Image: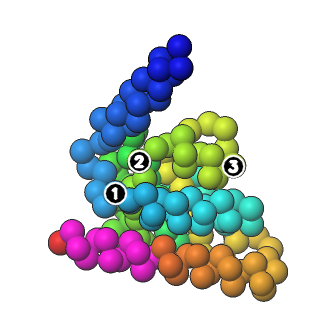
Amino acid sequence: MGSDSETEKSAQKQKKAIALAPIAKPLAGKKLSKRTFKLVRRAAEHKCLKRGVKEVVKSIRRGGKGICIIAGNISPIDVITHVPILCEESEIPYIYVPSKEDLATAGNTKRPTCCVLVLTKPPKGEIPKEEQEKLKADYDQVVTDIAELTSSMF
């Protein structure tokens, strides 16, 4: 009986890999995904996060700066195809992560999330200096990793 659950788990892992969109490039590896989810978690705690396509697009058009994290297993893909173009025009780094469910979990949301925008500073109020330094350090690390990944692609 134990082998059935193992078979189901391996099938789910294969399903995740198969369901990735063809435009999901640059795709974060395991290490970068883990760092990115950690950044999203911290940003969600300090209210420096925009969730969902509508909020992200509105924030980018209004001049918000940060990192855009997009889920790679979105269906239909037409929902998010315009987001990377907006990010490139606004010079906002973006990265794809394999799972929308993991992205939602990191962002403290029960509902799967297509994309999030991690802002450099909170839209309202201030956060403590120590916490801001931690968030900035994580942010800078992820930005440099994304820059390395995108430079190796082209």
Q: Are marks 1 and 3 in contact (CB under 8 Å)?
A: no
Q: Main secondary structure of the magenta part?
A: helix
Q: Amino acid at mark 2?
A: Pro
The mark that comes first in sequence, 1 or 3, is: 1
Query: Which quadrant of the view contains residue 20?
Result: top left
Residue 74, horizontal then vertical, whole percent? 40, 39
Q: Cβ–Cβ below 8 Å for labels 2 and 1?
A: yes
Work out whether mark 2 precedes mark 3 in sequence or the reverse, and give the earlier one. Answer: 2
The residue under the point 45% across, 63% down is: 31
Work out whether 63 lies above or below 50: below
Q: Is residue 131 left or right of residue 24?
A: right
The residue labelled by disc 2 is: 98
Instruction: Specify the farthest residue to the left.
Output: 154
| Residue indicated by mark 1 | 27
Residue 1: mark: none
Hey, what amino acid is under mark 3?
Asn
Q: Which residues are magenta?
A: 143-153
Quarter of the C terminus within the rendering: bottom left
